[in-house]
Amino acid sequence: MKKFLFMLLTGLSVATLANAQINSIKGSVKDDKGNPLSFVFVGDDQYKNAVFSDVSGDFTIPVSADSKLKFELKGYEDMLIDVSKNSNNFQIVMRSTSQGSSTAALSTQSRSDTALQRPNDVDFMQLPGHQKGQLHGSRYLYVNFVHGFVLNASDVLFHHPDYLFDYDKLEGKLLYTSNMTTVNEVSWDQTKSFTLYSSNGERLDFEKVPAIDNSHFSQVIASGKKYKIYKLIKTKFVRADYVNNGMAAHGNDYDEYLDDADYYFFDVQASQLKKMSPRKKAIKEVFAKEADKVNKYLSDNSGDINDAYLNKLVDFMNQ
C-alpha cells in the first residue's frame, strides 16, 4: 500500500494565532429548496478550524473577525463566506453543481494547489477486516468509511468532498477511499492530526504525539489552554484457540480483535506528559496543584469516569 503526500504550503505563524480573537458562531446550511444539508464541510483555512454540519444542517465553529469560511459538499458548488461581512446571519444556501456556476470551477482550480498525489490503488476487498467471515471485533474504528479532514505537517487543512476515511487501530494508519472500491493510506510523516465524524455526527479528534506512541495516533479526549487528555487505543488480533478433548472444552472458536486503551494527561503550561488511569485517585494526582478545584468537581459529579466524563472535567479545569 503506497502513501500520498500533502503539498507543502506556508503555515500560519504562532504570533498570528495568539493575537486572534476567537469566538464561536452558529449557522445552518440548506439547498436552494430549503432542505437542510448534512455533512457540509465548514472550514477556516487561516485558523485551522473545521466542522461538519449536522443532520439539521446546523453548525457551530470558532472564528475570528477576519475568518473566511469555506463550505464544501459533493454535488454542490463550493462557497467562501467572509465572516466580517455577514454579521450574525450565517444562513447558507448552497446550489447544486448542475446549475453550472463558475464558482465550482474556481474552487476546483484553487483546490489543486493542495491536491493529493494519488498512490497506486489496492483492491478494497483485499484489505483484511473489510471482508465477510466469522470474526469478532474490528481492526478499524468504523464499520463504514466516514467524513473527515486532515491537518498536514505544514499546518495545511485538507478536505476533499470525494474522500471518506477510516482508522486502522491495529497498525495506526489513516485510510481513505474515493469510490468504495479501492482504499489508500495517508502518509504518517505528512499528517499532524485528523478529525473523523461518525455516521451519527459524533466527532473524534486524533493527533500525532510521538512521546506517547511513534506509530499510532492518539485520540484527543479533552483539550484546553492548561490541560489535555489523550487516549491511545491499542488493538490486538487474537486467533481462535478452541480446544475440546472430549472431557472439557475451552477457548474461543473465532478470531477476534481486542481493544485496550491507555490514558495520558498533558499539562500544557508545564509541558509535562503523564500516563494516568481513569480513576478518581489518579485524577486527583494529576490535578494536584489545583486540588480544591478538582475535589469540588469530583464531589459534584458522580457517574462512570469515561471519555465524556473526562472531557467535561478538563473543560471545567481549563476555566
Image (cartoon, helix red, strand yellow):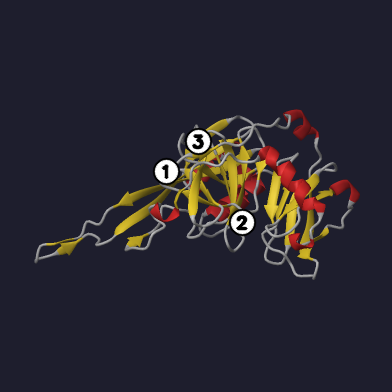
Mark 3 to mark 2: distance in Å? 25 Å
Camera-nearest label, 1 or 3: 1
Q: Amino acid at mark 2?
A: Asp
x and y percentages locating residue 115 in the rendered image = 64, 41
Nearer the observer, 55 or 259: 55
Camera-nearest label, 2 or 1: 1
Q: Which residue is mark 1?
A: 171
CA neighbours of label 1 inside 10 A, class few (<14), some (14 to 19), many (20+): some
Nearer the observer, 181 or 132: 181
Asked if the residues shown at circle 1 and circle 3 are in contact, with their CB atoms under 8 angstroms apart, the answer is no
Nearer the observer, 62 or 161: 161
**Quarter containing the N terminus:** top left
Q: Which residue is mark 3?
A: 274
Q: Which residue is mark 2?
A: 300
Mark 3 or 2, nearer chain start? 3
Is residue 27 visible from the viewing direction of this image?
yes
Q: Identify the image quadrant of residue 257.
A: bottom left
